[in-house]
């Protein structure tokens, strides 16, 4: 019985999916210290996580993997940085954050989810395209990009629902 439960937990990461990709970012030490929420514009082509750009079977020997179609708008990804103190050797220590569903596209003829996005984070000047957000990330931490206006509408809806629930609770 227990084994089944464990299998359930482990499964999503290993399910068939598109190719995993690697993206390396440098992040100011102060952002790490604060555990800040950051947003990055995901490049359309990233290194294959299996061969790190060298070319292998997973990426069709290309070394690079596409994360969106040519015509699709840039994808914005949010994440909360792992909180940690500045390292004495700036740029040396790297941590890896895995975001599911933000990696490479599966083959066009297969109905699979996208691969994982492996973010290699090290200290340094912020990588271009990486911005720190003032507010904490949204609760699920990883949000596929919606146009700014859509996101504002979604935020307003959340506020409205919270207000309504609060009003309902107070009214009981
Ligand atoms: Zn490869």
Image: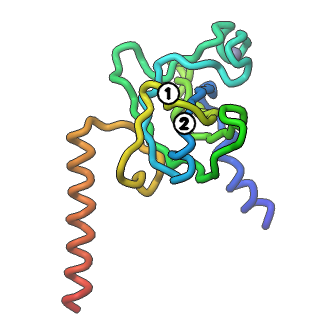
x then y, percent, for residue 138: 40, 53
Taking the view exactly as shown, the residue that stands out farthest to the bottom is 172
Give x and y (percent) for residue 116: 60, 34
Residue 93, relative to residue 53: is it above or below?
A: below
Q: Residue at x 42, y 17 (%)?
A: 69
Task: Answer whether labels 2 and 1 touch (C-beta < 8 Å).
Answer: yes
64 to the left or right of 44: right
Q: Is residue 99 left or right of residue 162?
A: right
Disc count in the image? Answer: 2
Q: Residue at x 41, y 36 (%)?
A: 131
Q: Which residue is mark 2?
A: 27
State the residue lying farthest toward the top: 61
Labelled disc at residue 144: none
Image location of residue 45, percent across then percent down: 52, 16
Above or below, 54 relative to 7? above
Residue identified by numbered label 1: 127
Q: Taking 41 as reference, is 159 above or below it?
A: below
Callout 1: 10 Å neighbours few (<14), some, many (20+)? few
């Amino acid at each position: 019985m227990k084994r089944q439960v464990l299998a359930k937990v482990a499964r999503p990461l290993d399910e068939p999916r598109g190719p995993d990709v690697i993206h390396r970012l440098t992040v100011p030490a102060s952002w790490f210290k604060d555990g800040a929420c950051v947003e990055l514009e995901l490049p359309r082509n990233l290194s294959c996580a299996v061969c790190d750009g060298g070319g292998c079977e997973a990426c069709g020997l290309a070394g690079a993997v596409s994360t969106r179609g040519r015509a699709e708008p840039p994808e914005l990804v949010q994440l909360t940085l792992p909180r940690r103190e500045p390292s004495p050797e700036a740029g040396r220590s790297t941590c890896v954050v895995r975001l599911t569903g933000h990696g490479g596209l599966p083959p066009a003829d297969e109905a699979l989810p996208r691969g994982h996005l492996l973010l290699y984070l090290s200290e340094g000047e912020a990588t271009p395209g990486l911005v720190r957000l003032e507010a904490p990330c949204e609760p699920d931490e990883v949000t596929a990009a919606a146009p700014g206006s859509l996101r504002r509408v979604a935020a307003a809806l959340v506020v409205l629902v919270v207000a309504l629930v609060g009003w309902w609770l107070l009214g009981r």
